[in-house]
Image (cartoon, grey):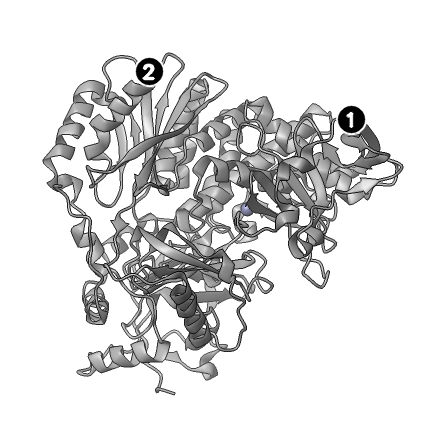
Amino acid sequence: MRRNYFFKLTVVFLILTFLLSGCENAETTASDNAVGNTVVKTGDAVSETDDQEEMQDEYMGRKGNTLSSLTGLSDNVIRADDDPEAQKVFAELERINGDELKYVTDEYGYITFLRGSILEGKCESPDKAKKALDMLLPALSYNNEMKLTPGEFLEDDFGNLYVIFREELDGEINESNKIKLFFDEDRNMVGLSSSVFPNYFDSDKKIDTAQAVDIVRDIVKQNDPDNEYYIYEDEVQLGYRLLTDSLTGMDFNCRVFSVLTDNPDSDVSKDEAPYLEHYVSQSGIYLGAEPKNAELAGDSTANRRMIDKWFGRSDKRSYTTVIDSINGKKQEITVPVAYDDGKYFLEDVDRGILCADYWEFEYNDEIKVISSETNDDWDQSYVTAYYNYITSYDFYADGGWIGPDGVGAPMILLMDYCNEDHSPIDNLSYLGQFEQAHLFAATSRGNEYHKLLDMIAHEYTHSVTTSILGNVIYKNETGAINEGLSDILGELTELVHYAEIGNSVSADKVFLMGGDGSIVTFRDLYDPEAYRQPSAAGGVYYVPPAGVPSSMNDRGGVHVNSSVVSHILYEMAETADIPFDEMGKIWQTVACMLVPGTGFKELAEIIPTACELSKHTEYKEDISKCVEESRMAVTDPYSYPTQGTCKVYFDLPPWINWNRVRLDLIGEDDMMHSSWPAKGTNRIKVNVYPGKYKIQLTEFDESGKAEDAWFYDGNTWGDQSFKDRLTELKADSFYKVGPITPADPQ
Ligand SMILES: [Zn+2]
């Protein structure tokens, strides 16, 4: 074997070395020149202390920093530039495709998106698709020995074929490493999307499941002694997961024990998932935790097993009622119901949709289907949610995508989302998959969101993208793309539906997510900044990718930067005057082209390619301009000159955990602008409008609670007594906020 992909775990001194060298090599300010009239402000000069290492030790001890760094990892990945085999493939691609060739590469120089072919003829058989992949592999992965097995393939309504290959490791499927080849209706290769993360293999020492559980129990007790965690000891799994090194920000696959606990934060932040999945390496090293939505297949009892038996009814009836529609109008709707043994059930026999009670499912292991003796006394909120899910289903089915997974997987809509004590959870959500059915929390007594077709279609789109990706990396750019696509396709579902029934959405509400009648508006795709979202990468409200995605940074801004993607919908309507149903086809094609690792750079190429594949080539040029304006492909979006704004940079000292801080600028209008260091760096960048701001830096502990805070007064950092001091920031200026000094050890 030519390539070495066995890595050794590193020890603590390497972490310290990284912190020190990371500080010395902090990014230069070359990009600062992009801003005219530069004003550089500095606070107290930093005094390089002789006992910096002592500070490091104190830092490590104080935080109980348990996330181990696998710093040696990146050194072992051969870069494509240094690999003659990879270079041969690039040369061959250039020879075959000439000027038409387009590709995007990852940080190691391997292809993540390709617009072009490696084949000189057509691809007539699956064997030839595999041959194309084998020819390309040296340019796709540092690991030439990577074993790829064909997964499912999709054929869309335009006749395009998407052939999916997944990595197989020791007989297990690694859902993060996936390559998707695109062929047009004539079976010419069009290109590919690829997501290949390095694999990390643990040392030989092996722990067992019980030891993994003990390690997690100790960690949560140590990091968060105030909270009780329930550990699902029977749910421990051993398998490949995509993890991120907490210090370098490097993503890698590792075979780990996954230990589920409840998530004590889930009630505090509505975006947080009900579970935490903790990862322990096979040699017993704790590697962090991620919030989890999806209920796992093993978490069930006999009562909830065999989903099929709940979808067995065949006597189809219907129910007609009048509901509140958009613009305050009434709308008559008819929904399918099923009849069985003297009772009616909220079940769509043809589409495979069943309505059941949330509490009974979650806390009593029972699927209690919503039923009626008379078919005229249904809860109107259930019927409205059910109708909106059916409408979402049909929007996709019109484009050839049947059910959440494209081939008709059943759905269960769970009504009255609540806690175990029956108190409502004020949210709606896609819950994930249970056996083969997709689950949704479809109504809540705490809100009226079930009336919002765009929000219901947003949740439905999550089930579609989850099925397409296999593994959703719900953080940073990949998470923002997931949220942005849900907003775009959710909004398009609503616009197309109301146009069809002749009750068009009023002009001032066309691009609002939510916002119908008296119900809250969540986001505005026309004016994202009105809801604290950026209109472009690097713009005001934009946030960088986070090293440790958590609730304190919206998992790297998944609901913040989603507008970098979703604002394109407005731009498309403005620039290219495309009918909404046609836009739907383009964006559904975009969704088909994604792989788990697809980020902004790749998406910027996927969108114009999707115009071609969906037979909308005439719009390609206009849409490419919209993509360009989103700046999603810019390497450092902050370096882009943005007139009339001020850029604030701040370098963190080594004794602060860069992954657990947030800089907040609070304007006199109470609007808050947050940022944190882009993953793997110690520099915080934020772009704001001119004005007076309170500037504060907060450090969080492992469990996300605020631990330390520093306040800036325009010259220096101080304690709580500086809290209300304002710093004036001027337009078209660059501010370098001075360093802070460590607080006395407490
Ligand atoms: Zn969402």
Q: Is residue 507 left or right of residue 24?
A: right
Residue matched to label 1: 315
Q: Is residue 276 visible?
A: yes
- Where residue 368 appears, as percent x and y from the top left, is 73, 46
Residue at image coords 16%, 20%: 95
> Tag on residue 419?
none
Q: Relative to residue 568, is residue 643 depicted above or below?
A: below
Q: Is residue 223 left or right of residue 392?
A: left
Q: Secondary structure at mark 2?
A: loop
Foreground residue among 3 and 562: 3
Q: Is residue 219 left or right of residue 249?
A: right
Badge 1: few (under 14), some or many (20 or more) residues near its Cα, within 10 Å?
few
Q: Is residue 362 left or right of residue 323?
A: left
Foreground residue among 665 and 98: 98
Q: How many marks?
A: 2
User: Quarter of the image containing the C terminus?
Assistant: bottom left
Residue matched to label 2: 125
Amino acid type at mark 1: Asp
Foreground residue among 634 and 746: 746
Look at the numbered disc 1 and say if its residue's Cβ is closer than 8 Å to ligand 1: no
- Where residue 389 appears, as percent x and y from the top left, is 66, 36
